[in-house]
Image (cartoon, grey):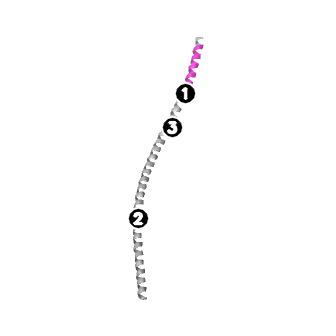
Amino acid sequence: KEMEKYKVQISQFTDYKAQWSSAQGDLHEQLKTAKKEAKESGEARTKAESELEELRDRVEEMALDKEMAEEMKECAELELERVTEQFEETKQELDLMKEEINNVKTKHKQSDS
């Protein structure tokens, strides 16, 4: 009777050992998978940080380009204003010359008559 009891206990221990080994194997696989995912996640994070840094650099370059473009626009507007004023002055001078020419022609016609 005692022997039967030990056989049952040995059988139970053997089953527990098999279950424990199976559970240990499952946990080992889960750990392996978790480590792999952690490594991939770390690599993805490093890549994302690198891409973010590149984007920051590009934004900074674009901001500088924008600033330069605004300065060039201001210079172009000042130049346009200067040239417009110069054109207006030249146009006024031309109008005065035309008026003088017309006056001279009118006087010349009057003196011929």
Quarter location, residue 66: bottom left
The residues tagged by marks 3 and 1 sit, at their Cα atoms, a distance apart of 21 Å
Task: Specify the label residue 23 is tagged with.
Answer: 1
Q: Is residue 106 left or right of residue 9?
A: left
Q: Which residue is mark 2?
A: 81
Disc nearer the start of the sequence (2/3): 3
The quadrant in which the C terminus is found is bottom left
Q: Nearer the viewer, residue 51 or 18?
A: 51
The span shown in magenta is 4-22
- Which residue is depicted at the point 58% across and 11% down? 2
The question of residue 9 being in magenta is answered with yes
Residue type, label 3 = Glu
Above or below, comparing residue 6 to residue 79 in the picture: above
Quarter location, residue 78: bottom left
- Which residue is depicted at the point 39% across and 70% down? 89
Disc nearer the start of the sequence (3/1): 1
Kindly check if marks 2 and 3 are in contact, taking CB atoms under 8 A apart as contact: no
The 10 Å Cα crowd at callout 1, few under 14, some 14 to 19, many 20 or more, is few
The 10 Å Cα crowd at callout 3, few under 14, some 14 to 19, many 20 or more, is few
Residue type, label 1 = Ala
Q: Nearer the viewer, residue 79 or 39?
A: 79
Horizontal and vertical percent position of residue 36: 50, 37
The residues tagged by marks 1 and 2 sit, at their Cα atoms, a distance apart of 84 Å
- Which residue is depicted at the point 55% across and 27% down? 23
Task: Specify the label residue 95 is tagged with.
Answer: none
Q: Residue furthest top?
A: 1
Q: Which residue is mark 3?
A: 37
Q: Nearer the viewer, residue 66 or 42?
A: 66
Name the secondary structure under disc 2: helix
- Which residue is depicted at the point 48% across and 42% down? 44
